[in-house]
Structures are given as structure tokens and as C-alpha cells.
Amino acid sequence: MTRSSKPSIGSFTFFVVALALGAYFTFAAVQGDFGLFRRVEIQAEAGELRLDLDRLNLEIAAIENLTQRLSDDYLDLDLLDEQARSVLGLLRADEIVIQ
């Protein structure tokens, strides 16, 4: 009994299925919801959100500074004058208004 050198259909099917599964999982690892490309997108978005957080923290610090300067414990007369002019439209007696 001699064995034929022709591969059987079962081994061919096994290799085709293994190749298809390997291709699928490789594609999913690169392009999927949890793949490499999505990870890069998430990291870029996280960087943008960190910049927004830093900007908002600076804005909060500036607002807290203005609030503290207008508090009862500490009154900044220049800031009070500026706020009275912008909000109430007040002028000093020695100023001339040109419209």
C-alpha cells in the first residue's frame, strides 16, 4: 500500500478555516472596536480633553480670583469701578461721553 502525495480534503479544509480565522482576528485586532486604530483615536481624544480641562481650570481660577476680589473681606476698588461702569453704565463726574 502506497500512500498518495495528494493532501486530503480534511486537511485542506482545516488550513482554509485556520487561515480565515487568523485573518478575521487580525482584522479585528487592528480595525475593531477595541483595535489598534481605535486606541490611537481614544488617546488623541484624551489629549484634547486634557487640554480642555487645563483651560477650564485656568478659567475657574480667574473667576475665583475675581470673586475673591469682590468679596466683603477684600474689596478691590479698581475692579469695583470697572464692574460699575460695565454693568450699571456709571461714569465719573470728570468724564466726557462721546457717542
Image (cartoon, rainbow, N blue to C red):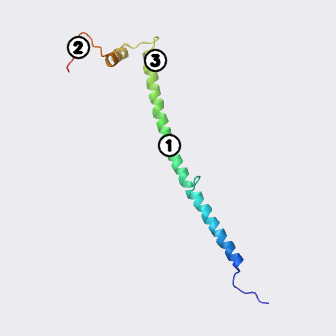
Q: Tell me whether circle 2 and circle 1 mark residues in contact (CB < 8 Å).
A: no
Q: Amino acid at mark 3?
A: Gln
Horizontal relation, residue 49 to residue 91: left or right: right
Write down the residue under mark 1. 47
Q: Quadrant of the C terminus?
A: top left
Q: Position of residue 92 (x, y in %)?
A: 27, 11
Q: Is residue 70 above or below residue 45?
A: above
Q: Mark 2: which secondary structure?
A: loop
Write down the residue under mark 2. 95
Q: Mark 1: which secondary structure?
A: helix
Horizontal relation, residue 10 to residue 35: left or right: right
* Cα distance between the residues tagged 3 and 2: 29 Å
Q: Is residue 59 above or below residue 40?
A: above
Horizontal relation, residue 4 to residue 52: left or right: right
Q: Which mark is residue 85?
A: none
Q: Which mark is residue 68?
A: 3
Q: Is residue 72 above or below residue 63?
A: above
Q: Amino acid at mark 2?
A: Glu
Q: Position of residue 54 (x, y in %)?
A: 48, 34
* Cα distance between the residues tagged 2 and 1: 49 Å
Q: Amino acid at mark 1?
A: Gly
Q: Looking at the image, is mark 2 or mark 1 earlier in the sequence?
A: 1
Residue at the right extreme of this rendering = 1
Identify the residue at image location x=52%, y=43%.
46
Q: Mark 3: which secondary structure?
A: helix
Identify the residue at image location x=48%, y=42%.
48
Q: Quadrant of residue 1?
A: bottom right
